[in-house]
Image (spheres, grey):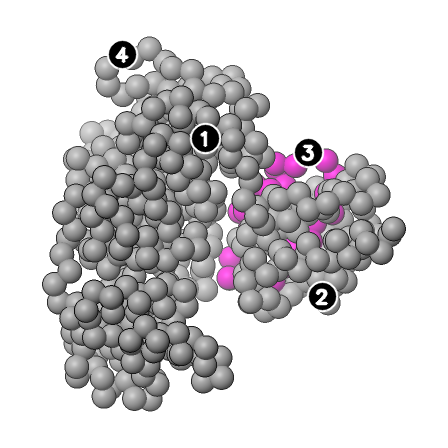
Amino acid sequence: MTPAGFEGFERVLVIGLGRSGRASCAVLRARGATVYAVDEKAPYELAQTRAEVEAAGARFVAPEDLEVVLRDVNVAVLSPGIPLNGSLVRRVQEAGVPVFSEIEVAYRICHAPIVAVTGTKGKTTTTALIGAMFRRAGKTTWVGGNIGNALIEQTAQAAPGDWVIAEVSSFQLESIRSFKPRISTILNIAPDHLDRYHSMDEYAEAKFRVFANQGPGDTFVGNFDDPIVGELVPSDGAQSRVPARALWFAREPHLVTALYLRGDRITYAPPTGDPRPVDILGLDEIRLVGAHNVANVMAAFLVGLAAGLDLEALRDAAREFEPLPHRLERVAELDGVTYVDDSKATNPSAVVAALHAIGQPVVLIAGGKSKRTDFTDMGKAAARAKAVVLIGEAADEIAAALPGTECTRAASMDDAVRVAKALAGPGDIVLLSPGCASFDMFASAEARGDAFRDAVLGALAGSR
């Protein structure tokens, strides 16, 4: 694969100094670019970060001094999470400096084919599973993006015969230009980040950019069961919006589906060659819980098959794959009650999926910082819970979606676990599945899950 080109990146401004921003500084400096870096966080929050980027050879610029360096830069690199309509980006654009997302720059320096995974929920699990499948098939594989490793770090190391598996968010896709994965997939699209997007249509269009630059030699894998993604299937002879070869999966067989369920078995209908269905795997062989994870596994299989990987290697990887931290992760059992951490359920649809995945009575811990999403469907699913404990800024908003359910407020995670423990009985599950962002109380969803684990283990120790 020939990169789209790295010309014009001699003098670069990196906007935002999270993990990806710091990695962009290091990689671009290593390639000889003059690099400036800017971030709007308070100086005391940036002390360590500033030292790190300056040690890499980049120059930190305070926001009030930005116009001084804008005369010297010819391109800006935008870190994930920094909004395109934010004040820093507006000032850069007003100076006539083009703004690229970090994944765009990562693509331009990449010599290996890229698999890009996006969707509202399930991205990280599916990305990690695809990475495991490629490694099991003997491919040198680099996994990065929204999953936690900066994509630019991974693509800078990837050789032409390797594969890069990238989890990409709508934020990252907003400012791509030529980003062109060999294989792309959209797992689902449900209400999320409506504090950033004006409508669901705008949010969906950001996701659709994952296949915008693909061509006939590339592959798109789509979830036909998802109401929004499934609309990409053309009808009545209309031209498809997807410029790549499209492979579809669904729970039921359809005319367009290449992968579907036959009873409790995943089944493949090859789109070319021998048309006889191929038995792939039984659902009882998968260690992941819930119908949403069945869809994630099906997407991963179709990606692997599109890449020409050995089917037995794909099966082995799927059988061995364990749930990732903070995603329906079993923490402990105490007095016959099982405690489950699903802190990465940061939108209402993820909570609905979690509740549907669990068969036992549930005491739900939910809440956090709202993303201006509608809690109606989450409220309907949570109404079947044995009890609901609410935390964070969105507690009242969620309670309003549960008019017939008694909700208990908790001021902290320790308090929430204490209340849930009192409400649960043997055979029940205490489920942390917030349906919200974490930033009102915690630095991240991971930190929220860790606080839940600490509270549960503290309760366990106290009962001995």
> Residue 242 lies in what quarter of the image?
top left
The amino acid pointed to by label 3 is Gly
Q: CA distance from mark 3 to mark 2?
A: 27 Å
Q: CA distance from mark 3 to mark 1?
A: 26 Å
Query: Where residue 223 appears, x then y in whole percent?
Result: 39, 35
Query: Closer to the camera, 280 or 46?
Result: 46
Q: Earlier in the sequence, mark 3 or mark 1?
A: 1
Q: Which residue is mark 1?
A: 317
Q: CA distance from mark 2 to mark 4?
A: 58 Å
* Vertical placement of residue 403 versus 70, above or below: above
Secondary structure, mark 2, is loop
Residue 397 visible in the current orientation:
no
The amino acid pointed to by label 4 is Asp
Query: Where residue 100 appears, x then y in whole percent?
Result: 24, 64
Secondary structure, mark 1, is helix
Secondary structure, mark 3, is loop
Q: Which residue is mark 3?
A: 359
The span picked out in magenta is 348-376
Q: Nearer the viewer, mark 3 or mark 1?
A: 1
Query: Where residue 414 appears, x then y in whole percent?
Result: 75, 62
Q: Residue at x 39, y 40 (%)?
A: 131
Q: Earlier in the sequence, mark 1 or mark 2?
A: 1
Q: Earlier in the sequence, mark 3 or mark 2?
A: 3
Q: How many marks?
A: 4
Q: Residue at x 36, y 35 (%)?
A: 134
Q: What numbered label is drawn on residue 412?
A: 2
Q: CA distance from mark 4 to mark 1?
A: 25 Å
